[in-house]
Amino acid sequence: MDFVSIIAIALMVIGAFGIIFLKKPLDKVIMFTILDAGFVLAVVLFKYLDVAMFAALAGPLSTLVFILSIVKVNDIRKKKLERGEING
């Protein structure tokens, strides 16, 4: 394995473990972006450039959807706390 493939694998592993073990939602978004960067790099190394182009175009869109879902879940939790439905 060459050095660049080791970097791609490391980025994917770091991103996956970060998503699993970090608690804050915005930290998970950052780790998701790191995982996505490693995935695109690995796809480029295997010379699937059409798939890499699609992943590069779909990555920001999926990150945006992820952030919007975090905002919506936090909004729902805040409303439930105000109504007293959640003990917290």
Image (spheres, rainbow, N blue to C red):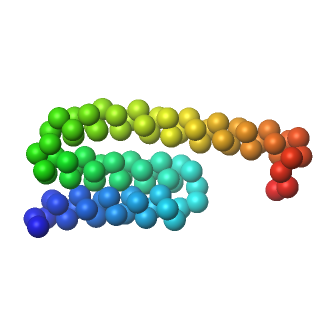
Q: Left or right: 4 with respect to 34?
A: left
Q: Is residue 32 above or below residue 68?
A: below
Seen at 47% across and 58% down, the residue is 19
Q: Position of residue 36 (x, y in %)?
A: 33, 48
Q: Left or right: 30 with respect to 47?
A: right
Seen at 19% across and 65% down, the residue is 6
The part of the image, by quadrant, that contains residue 55 is: top left
The part of the image, by quadrant, that contains residue 60 is: top left
Seen at 47% across and 35% down, the residue is 64
Q: Is residue 81 above or below residue 27?
A: above
Q: Left or right: 67 with respect to 84?
A: left
Q: How many marks?
A: 0
Residue pushed farthest right?
84
Q: Position of residue 50 (x, y in %)?
A: 17, 35
Q: Quadrant of the C terminus?
A: bottom right
Q: Position of residue 24 (x, y in %)?
A: 58, 55
Seen at 64% across and 36% down, the residue is 72
Q: Position of residue 1 (x, y in %)?
A: 11, 67
Q: Is residue 13 above or below residue 68?
A: below
Q: Left or right: 52 with respect to 31?
A: left
